[in-house]
Amino acid sequence: MSFNQKLARCGVYCGQCRGFTEEVTDLAKQFKQWVEQDYSWLKDVEESFDYENFLKGLEWFINSTCPGCRNSSESWCDVKKCEKIQQDIVDNCLVCDEFANCPYTDYQRNRYSYLFDHIKFIEKEGFDKFLEEEEKKAEEGVRIQDIRDY
């Protein structure tokens, strides 16, 4: 998958998200396997623990990977309502000169304020260098969940 496919339309680099990269899915699969192998006795002796619902919960995580917004038709995303995005006039909000005041990016500006630094980086170093840097950060373990504002 290209770096560009890992970049959401809003400018968030999905390659740094545990849901997108399937880290959560992989851990849930492994954990479910361990629970079934090593803790199956819980279903018979532990009344305070709902073993079957716990396994259902793990199954939910296994089956709930994020396809990324480029491959999703999620209606909750305001960015997808933008004409420039809909008509592919801009690939993502980081290269749009209206980002700072756009009504469609309120959520991104508030939750991912670091995107302003990304815009400055792109202006200075270029878009390809930006994508390389974000992928490098992802490989080093940087995760959206750790760097977002809330």
Image (cartoon, grey):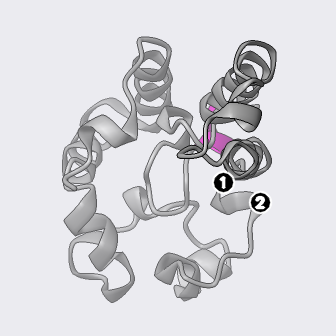
Q: Quadrant of the C terminus?
A: bottom left
Disc 1 to disc 2, C-alpha distance: 6 Å
User: Would you name the residue on which mark 1 appears?
Assistant: 68
Q: Residue at x 79, y 23 (%)?
A: 36
Q: Which mark is residue 71?
A: 2
Relative image position of residue 69 (x, y in whole percent): 64, 61
Q: Is residue 73 above or below residue 30?
A: below
Q: Is residue 97 above or below residue 83?
A: above
101 lies left or right of 92: left
Q: Residue at x 55, y 34 (%)?
A: 15
Relative image position of residue 139 (x, y in whole percent): 50, 14
Q: Name the main secondary structure of what is drawn in magenta.
A: helix
What range is drawn magenta here?
2-6
20 lies left or right of 99: right
**Which quarter of the figure has residue 136?**
top left
Q: Residue at x 61, y 36 (%)?
A: 46
Q: Do the CB atoms of the residues marked 1 and 2 lie less than 8 Å apart?
A: yes
Given the image, on which type of amino acid does mark 2 rest?
A: Asn
Q: Work out whether residue 51 or residue 140 is closer to the camera in this orientation and state it.
A: 51
Q: Is residue 92 above or below residue 121?
A: below
